[in-house]
Image: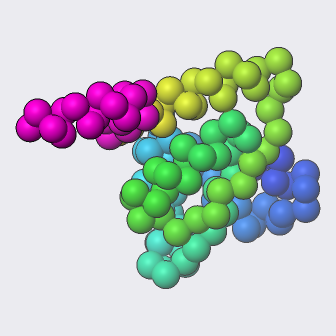
Amino acid sequence: MAEYAVGRGVPEGAILLEDRSTTTEENLRFSKEMVTQRYGPDAAGVAVTSEYHVLRTATLARRLGVDVQVAPAPSAAYYRVSAFLREFVALLAQHPVLHLVLAALVSVPLPALALIAINS
């Protein structure tokens, strides 16, 4: 992503490259530490990630209190469908109970809900 940014005109000195992480969550945590050390606790920035990974990165950043805008970088066309599906499943897995409840509420017909309410 650093090469991509430099190729689009971002000065190398403006890029902080985090290279210790093994997960997106670790990357955001370590990057926040680096940015805070260099620019202070009120710093904000841009996190660049693959286009299919933007939504999950943004939700993780919000949950971790990392003040970034998340920008997409293109990925290979052959990889997009499987990558978007994987990201969708990963987002569902972040809050499984909530998503199961919502799925049940959406899939249960209204008469069944009415019967449950009457019998309660």
Query: Magenta span has 111?
Result: yes
Q: Who's the residue at 90% across and 51% down the image?
A: 7
Q: Position of residue 34 (x, y in %)?
A: 50, 63
Q: Is residue 3 left or right of residue 27?
A: right
Can you see residue 92? yes
Can you see residue 104? no
Q: Is residue 95 left or right of residue 66?
A: left
Q: Quadrant of residue 45?
A: bottom right
Foreground of the two, 44 or 77: 77
Q: Who's the residue at 50% across and 26% down the image?
A: 89
Q: Is residue 104 left or right of residue 20?
A: left
Q: Quadrant of the N terminus?
A: top right
Foreground of the two, 93 or 109: 109
Foreground of the two, 120 or 41: 120
Q: Who's the residue at 58% across and 73% down the image?
A: 44
Q: Quadrant of residue 94?
A: top left
Q: Position of residue 8 (x, y in %)?
A: 90, 56
Q: Who's the residue at 84% across and 63% down the image?
A: 10
Q: Main secondary structure of the magenta part?
A: helix
Q: Quadrant of residue 75?
A: top right
What are the residue bounds of the magenta stretch?
A: 97-120
